[in-house]
Image (cartoon, rainbow, N blue to C red):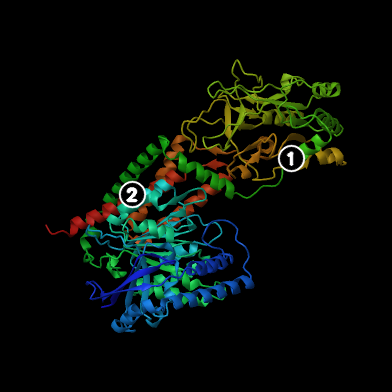
Amino acid sequence: MGKLVVLKFGEGSFEQGFAVTLQIGEEHERATTEITGKLPSFPEMPLYYSHWQSSYRQIGNRYRLHADKMQVTNVSMIQDCENTSHILRARFNTWLRAEEFRPLREKWLERLLSTEEVRVILQTENSQLQLLPWHLWDLLERYPKAEIALSSPSYDRIHKPRTLNPLVNILAIVGNSQGIDTQADQALLQQCSNADVSFLVEPQRKELTEQLWGKNWDILFFAGHSSSNKNGESGRIYLNKTDSLTIGELKYALRKAIENGLQLAIFNSCDGLGLARELADLQIPQMIVMREPVPDQVAKEFLKYFLQGFAGGESLYQAVRQARERLQGLEDRFPCATWLPMICQNPAQTPPTWDKLWSTTKPEEKPNLALSTSLSTRRRLTTTLLSSLAITGLVFGVRWLGWLESLEIPIFDQMMRSRPTEALDSRLLVITIDDGDLAIQRQNNESLIGASISEKSLNKVLAKLNQYHPHAIGLDIYRDFPAKQPDLITRLQQTPNLVGVCKGSDSRANITGIKPPPEIPEINLGFSDFIHDPDGVIRRHLLFMNQEPTSLCPATFAFSLQLASLYLRPSGIQPKFTPEGNLQLGKTIFPSLKSRSGGYHEIDANGGQILLNYRSPKQIAQQVKLTQFLASPINPSAIKDKIILIGVTAKGDSQDTWATPYGAPLDEQMPGVLVQAQMISQILSAVQDGRPLLRVWSLWSEVVWIWGWSLLGGVWAWQKLSLPWLALGVSITSGVLYIICFGLLISGAWVPFIPSILSLVATVSLMSVYNSAKKVRVEVPK
């Protein structure tokens, strides 16, 4: 049996000194020895720690602190850190050898043998005392089986009896991992024997809370970025790229988890003392945190060594000490790595071993030949068919209610992003107006009132373009005011292949619309309206619509369709409509989306809408800046017989950007003129090149597809494989399903992935439960 040593620090300060009580006793028993003493004043001690802390943090070794870019480590910084660490260690031990503290030191040496396993608990409210490197105390280093932990003077025992789980239940939270590698942490946890690890990767707050409430966890693990405030009273973990939480914001869920038996929290992240202080108030039995920002490599190595020891049978304290000391091999690159891991302990609780976290009592498994003969092939087939039909009906019902849309749309976006980038569309040229072009126009005293291109520059552009005979010119710039220059007025009126834009009104959304350029004939106008989903992403292409009676925009065809039609007109292709109301260009029909199409649930399907089959995430066609176009000679072949688009890509004034499947954040959005280019390219490629349009299957085709995967799940369960093999089979099948859905999307078909995977897994689960229940009934004696 090991020994328990408690060092209690009373009221005091580094300026006045501290009263100290030393208690020594056997584990699980009351202390048999107690002595009081004092540590004298030492006002400079916090300064020594602060100097070391400052030199350590300047190194910047890819800490798990936050996602900011860290500076590059150099030799002088490492040397400075080592120097300050030696000074701190020397001053710290000099203080602990003070005459007033000698009686406690001698009593320690008298009562404890160097061969004993000693658990040392340091109780204090003083955060500066907690920060000091107590593991470097020369007295503690004489005891190779001793390890120190921090504790608050106020604590309480959790009185609710703990129910052992069949395996060690580990909730592993993988937070924001920008700039660090948390994959190694996940792999190490998965290798633990007799453990059931549940991973939450960059979870939302609600998801984390529900997990903490929903299961009896033994270990809570966090990897990612974290930090503590300056006084160390509270900490913060970063769940994902946008959300972070303090322990107080998870207080009720964590308290419930502790009441249900949570024994250990491991924060393999930076600066964890603030986290530990808040968790201690919830009476968690024990924690492992890092005292300072921890380099990524050090965090991974510590976890590896700790799990090897703890899951291999070592006590918690011994596993931490051994793992901490093994980090010394990294200190040539990561100085003071052995200083970082710390234990925080509730003194009322006894640290468990790995084997005591889970129940080793398992029901005796007896072979049962009756099970294999109780179900005939016909009965099993019937059960599988009925189960798959029931699951298919349930999944399709859930999908019909729209509950799967939030899952299907992101998968659709992921597949869109994963597709290979196509070549530039040589039929288009985009003249862009960026921030530099706006600045140059202003420097030239050109008026930009109401527009992003001056009348002078616009007139020059149109004059230069007309020299080289493009098929169509698209002015993707709102000009709801008359031109002033006579030359520009004439050019706008007499350029037959020039298409202008206007914006339709929407009384339901209180959108008044935007008038077209008054000089451009109505026959050459197209609406610029985009249809975006509730998350702001453009996934649909609006080809035509009926404008409201009060709309300021008279155009019924989209800007993109007008330009594509001008390009196709010399080939004798004109827009027309099928009896079903679908647009037709040549032999190509553009089937309009319905309110329930693919993964969509009750969308506004007014007008002629199709799915937008993007060609490329970035550059769709050749681009040239406005200033460059006006100042440089032009290759006639770059313009002749092409569609020329003029639009804004500036990120300052006149910003016109949109979220797409390739990116929703502002800096990843696509300029509106390039979205128009994607739409024009989609129309031309479908008509001239046979490039597939994105389509969805009919309702019954989707039902049969989902049912087929549900049947496959029933076949897997029919094999009565062990759980690991069954999980492997389902995982491989799910991967094959994803590849098939991805291949179909590339060929132009958006087919259900999420409903199919749900039906597969649900049928496997249902049939496995049924088989288990049947087995139990057969084994029970009649």
Work out whether residue 236 or residue 439 is closer to the camera in this orientation and state it.
236
Query: How many numbered discs, if any?
Result: 2
Q: Residue 252 — which label?
A: 2
Amino acid type of disc 1?
A: Asp
Residue 148 spot, x, y in % from top left: 37, 72
Residue 532 sits in quarter:
top right
Work out whether residue 681 or residue 629 is closer to the camera in this orientation and state it.
629
Q: Quadrant of the N terminus?
A: bottom left
Residue 626 sits in quarter:
top right
Q: Element under label 1?
A: helix
Q: Is residue 33 visible?
A: yes
Above or below, 193 relative to 658: below
Label 1: how many Cα within 10 Å (few below 14, some 14–19, many 20+): some
Residue 37 spot, x, y in % from top left: 33, 74
Above or below, 706 relative to 307: above
Question: Badge 1 is on which residue?
Answer: 435
Give the residue drawn at x 47%, y 30%: 602
The single residue placed furthest to the front in the displayed view is: 16
Amino acid type of disc 2?
A: Tyr
Horizontal side of 501 relative to 84 (left or right) equals right
Horizontal side of 49 relative to 149 (left or right) equals right
